[in-house]
Image (spheres, rainbow, N blue to C red):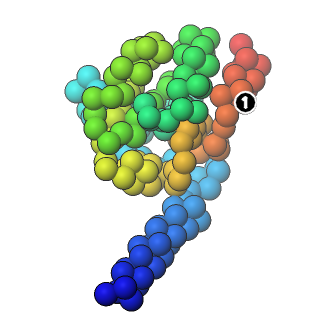
Amino acid sequence: MKKILQYLLLGIFLLIGLSYLYLKYFTIEDGEQAPDFETTLVDGTPFRLSDLHGQYVLLDFWGSWCAPCLRESPQLVSIYDSYANNLVIVTIALEKNDKTWRKAADKFGFVWKHQIVEENQFVLMSSIARKYGVTEIPAKFLISPNGELMGRYSLKKIDSLFSSKK
């Protein structure tokens, strides 16, 4: 019985490791077309990422349970307030249930239209997160107006980039 348990644990760790490697090394590269996805916004509106072509898009993966995400929230709101005419923010809350994100979003003042909640018991296994190779949050991706992935950017770098465009 002990031997079976050891093999089972080894198999689980191997599966987790292989999943991590897949997400880390078989995702898109900077300069490639950003993976499109369709979902529903929290207000019930159908959404497709490619509908935002022609605009800069900040794709922000976060979670209400993630302390670093919550620490960055005031800066994200500041970027929205400063660059709303030049940058569309799309937040994707990775949650185990779809109730807890609203409290955090309301607390920090997430007022932009494009808010998504991806509910999954294994939050990083969200279908959208997998398309972008998200293995940890917060994770922010900047997408160019022609739909190409510019890269994974910090809020500080995004602020610097858009402040020079004013």
Farthest front residue?
2
Label 1 is placed on what type of residue?
Lys
Q: Going by the image, does 18 lie left or right of 142?
A: left
163 to 122, vertically: above or below = above
Which residue is drawn at the image coordinates 55% and 38% (left, top)? 138
Which residue is drawn at the image coordinates 26% and 22% (left, top)? 43
Nearer the observer, 99 or 10: 10
Residue pointed to by mark 1: 157
x%, y% of residue 89?
Answer: 50, 26
x%, y% of residue 139?
Answer: 56, 41
Which residue is drawn at the image coordinates 59% and 25% (left, top)? 72
x%, y% of residue 119?
Answer: 30, 42
Quadrant (top left/top right/bottom left/bottom right) for the C terminus: top right
Q: Residues within 10 Å of mark 1 (few under 14, many from 20)?
A: few
Nearer the observer, 89 or 85: 89
Which residue is drawn at the image coordinates 64% and 50% (left, top)? 31
Name the quadrant containing residue 115: top left
Q: Going by the image, does 166 lie left or right of 124?
A: right
x%, y% of residue 27?
Answer: 54, 59
Q: Is residue 98 visible?
A: yes
Farthest left residue?
44
157 to 32, vertically: above or below = above
Which element type, helix, strand or loop, lies under badge 1? helix
Q: Going by the image, does 88 lie left or right of 47?
A: right
Q: Is residue 59 visible?
A: no
Nearer the observer, 59 or 5: 5
Q: How many numbered markers are drawn? A: 1
27 to 139, vertically: above or below = below
Quadrant (top left/top right/bottom left/bottom right) for the N terminus: bottom left
Q: Going by the image, does 96 lie left or right of 89?
A: left
